[in-house]
Image (tube, rainbow, N blue to C red):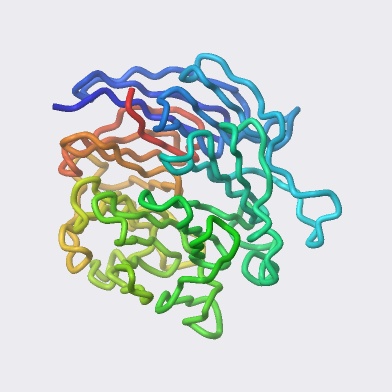
Amino acid sequence: MTDAIQLLVGTRKGAWVLKSDAERRTWRVEGPKFLGQIINHFVADPRDGKTMLMAASTGHLGPTILRSTDGGATWTEAKTPPAFPKGDKLGRAVNHTFWLEPGHADEPGVWWAGVSPPGLFRSGDGGQTWEGVSGLNDHPMVAQWLPPDGGTPDGAILNQVVVDPRDARHMYLASCSAGVLETHDQGQTWRPLNKNVRCDFLPDPYPEFGQDSHYIALAPSNPDRLWQQNHCGIYRLDRPGETWDRIGEAMPREIGDIGFTIVPHPRSAETAYVFPMDGTDVWPRVSPGGRPAVYRTADAGRSWTRQDRGFPAEQGWFTVKRQAFCGDQADPFGLYLGTTGGEVWMSGDEGESFRQIAAHLPEIYSVVAAPL
């Protein structure tokens, strides 16, 4: 038995919501909300089922956080959006918020935000007011770990915050310039966690930091297992271990193991999904050969199976950004992806087949699945 799902879709020109029936067979599209505004991330709070936040860049407000407490019916701007202090020693000024993360289940009202140029912010009041996390933003190594310039084509970013569901003090960050960072005291102190993650674009291919970690995810059924889609491959780390294993080497050589996102299965710690991109040159970043496919491992990365039924057999030049591939919690597991061409695709059978459920949207930046 499945449940109705809503997909929160952030785009280059506003936000949309896709709502399913209980079987995820039919979908209705609602929107746009904030037409014309850049919505980098659109997230629902699983702790109360009512609060939603958007990371928005608006023409008149600039970079801000938009907040709803009634499931998206009405919206207000944050009273104090993320902002570096005036006179910041690195000259940082928030260009946009890239990532929004609800806090631990035991900390209602807490949210985390990763911004560009890279920095970490915290809200304790459901996203109304935000403060910088000094333990990272003012760290003695911050200029080397998270330089304000460079990074992705849209600027350097702190692109992900992950909270250990067993311990609110234990968190991971993914960034475009320091790889993975870890804290055990909720952000007061940090250390790199990048051993054996390759960095092809630096003179030292295995530095302590400098990696471009596109996406990390904890296995929901075993939070000691971390999955990572990196600029230079697919990796897995089993804690308390410190050394990442490049499981992407088992991918077909003609496909490679470059992509933006890795999605873990909610009930199997052995299973995860990736959406490969062409990594043969600097910026093709489209489906290899114009033939989109998801690849699934069911044995912790020792082997991978291609899943492409329903996708275009050729001339499907999909680009799927790092926030635009996700899964739900239903049984069977549902997968969802949004393309820069404005299409939303889904699988309701754990990747065995895919179908298009929306088209002609603006360039899609993020897709987040939440219960309806």
Q: Can you name the residue that lies furthest to the right here?
A: 87
- Estimate the x, y position of residue 300 in percent, counting from the top left: 21, 63
Q: Is residue 307 above or below residue 208?
A: above
Return the residue nearer the eye: 154 or 212. Answer: 212
Relative horizontal placement of residue 90, taking residue 135 as reference (left or right): right
Residue drawn at x 53%, y 59% is 185
Which residue is painted at 28% across and 47% down in the image?
A: 314
Horizontal and vertical percent position of residue 346: 28, 35
Q: Residue furthest top?
A: 73
Percent of width and height locating residue 189? 58, 65
Eyeballing the image, is 143 above or below 362? Answer: below
From this view, report whether residue 170 is shown above or below residue 99: below
Q: Which quadrant of the structure image shows residue 56?
A: top right
**Residue nearer the viewer, 310 or 7:** 7
Q: Is residue 39 left or right of residue 291?
A: right
Is residue 295 rendered to the left or right of residue 189? Answer: left
With 77 as the anchor, is 232 left or right in this view? left
Residue at image point 18% right, 51% down:
268
Give 196 or 190, whichever is nearer the viewer. 190
Nearest the eye: 164 or 7: 164
Image quadrant in which the N terminus is located? top left
- Which residue does the image show at 34% across and 61% down from the upper left? 226
The C terminus: image quadrant:
top left
Residue 254: image location, x then y, percent: 28, 68
> For residue 326, what is the image quadrant?
top left
